[in-house]
Every structure is written in C-alpha cells, then in structure tokens.
Image: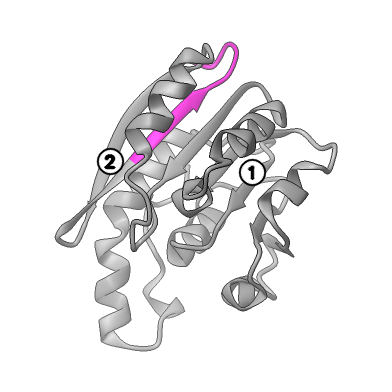
Amino acid sequence: MGHLAVRPEAFSSSRSVRSAERLEPLLERLDALLDLQPDDLLVQLGTAWPRCTLALADLVPLRYQILVVDPAPERLEPFVGTAKLRVAAMDALDFCAFPMQYDRILLEDTFLAGDGWWELVSQLLDRLNDGGRLLIVESEVPVTARMEQVARALERDGLEVKRDGANVGKRHVDLVLASKGDAPAP
C-alpha cells in the first residue's frame, strides 16, 4: 500500500490543501473497505469526491486504469488526461449494458435517488466478480436518505454488508459496503 495522502501540490490554493487534508479520513476508509489489489478492475460511478479518486489512483499501483463513469461530461473534466484514469460520459444503466466484470465498484449515492435504484444496484452486482466489493459512498451534498434501505436490500439479496463512515470536516459521510461471494467485509 502507498502513503494515504492527498497530494497538496495537486491543488492551487492553501484553502484547497486544507480541504484535501480534511478528506484523508474518508480516503483511509475508502482504501480499507475497497481493499484494492494490483490486479483489481475498479469502476467508479459518479464524481462527487474527485480528490479521493485522484488519491486512490496514486495509492495502489493498479495494473489497469480506474474507469470513472458519470452522465455529465463537465463533471469528468478533472479526470481527463490523468494517466491512471479512463473516463466515460454515460448513464449508469447504459454502462451496465457493457458485458464487463469488475472487482471493485465505487458508487456515489446520487445514482440511488430515483425509483429504479434497485435495478441499477442489481445490474452492478451482476457485473461484480465473485469476491468483489460494491462500496456506496454518500456524495458531498447528500441527495438521498436511502443508505439504510439500500443496506437492508443488499442483505436480503444475500450479500455481506458493512455500514461504515468517515468524518470530513464537520460532516459525517455514510458508507455501505457489500461483499459478493467469498470476500468477507473488513
């Protein structure tokens, strides 16, 4: 594992550096819960925590690029040109139509705001390899109070679920981890 730090030189102002330092508890939880291994394929749906994504890309020497998916091209701009990341501007359900399997999926809770959230989660679970992990993270501006409902639904579907969280500044960020197959939740 690499050093758990968001690189201050990646940000232009002292305010940005302070903001990056506040993200370290969240980054530490993401790192521990995802438990990334060098051969893992990681996809991230949503761009709510771009500094954490960039730090995760530096943290573990992944063999493959992290795929960042978001329906809004402008939200993908901070990631364009980053060698360790590949971006795709598309809807999450359209993304699920591609017949690829992943080891780790990082899902922003904004994708769970609509009525069809379980269809998306089910399709993502179908794309998750045995031993894989789906980590749902609350966005910087929470749009849903659905995390408890999602955790219960995942448990009913036979997945091992762990509730966790991190404090970012004065705010608590909810995390829900679902482990598929033989990967116990940490």
Residue 148 image-quadrant placement: top left
Residue 62 in the image: above or below residue 156: below
Q: Which residue is mark 1?
A: 42
Is 182 a magenta residue? yes
Residue 179 in the image: above or below residue 70: above
Residue reaching furthest to the left? 170
**Residue 82 coordinates in the image, percent (x, y):** 66, 70
Q: Quadrant of the C terminus?
A: top left
What residue lies at 46% left-to-right and 41% top-to-bottom? 136
Q: Nearer the viewer, residue 119 or 44?
A: 119
Label 1: few (<14), some or many (≥20) within 10 Å? many
Mark sitting earlier along the chain (2/1): 1
What residue lies at 34% left-to-right and 56% top-to-bottom? 142
**Residue 47 coordinates in the image, percent (x, y):** 52, 63
Residue bounds of the magenta highlight: 175-186
Q: Is residue 86 visible?
A: yes
As drawn, is 130 to the left or to the right of 18? right
Residue 133 in the image: above or below residue 138: above
State the colouring used for the structure image. one colour
Q: Nearer the viewer, residue 69 or 184?
A: 69
Tag shown at residue 165: 2
What residue lies at 85% left-to-right and 37% top-to-bottom? 99
**Residue 181 coordinates in the image, percent (x, y):** 60, 13
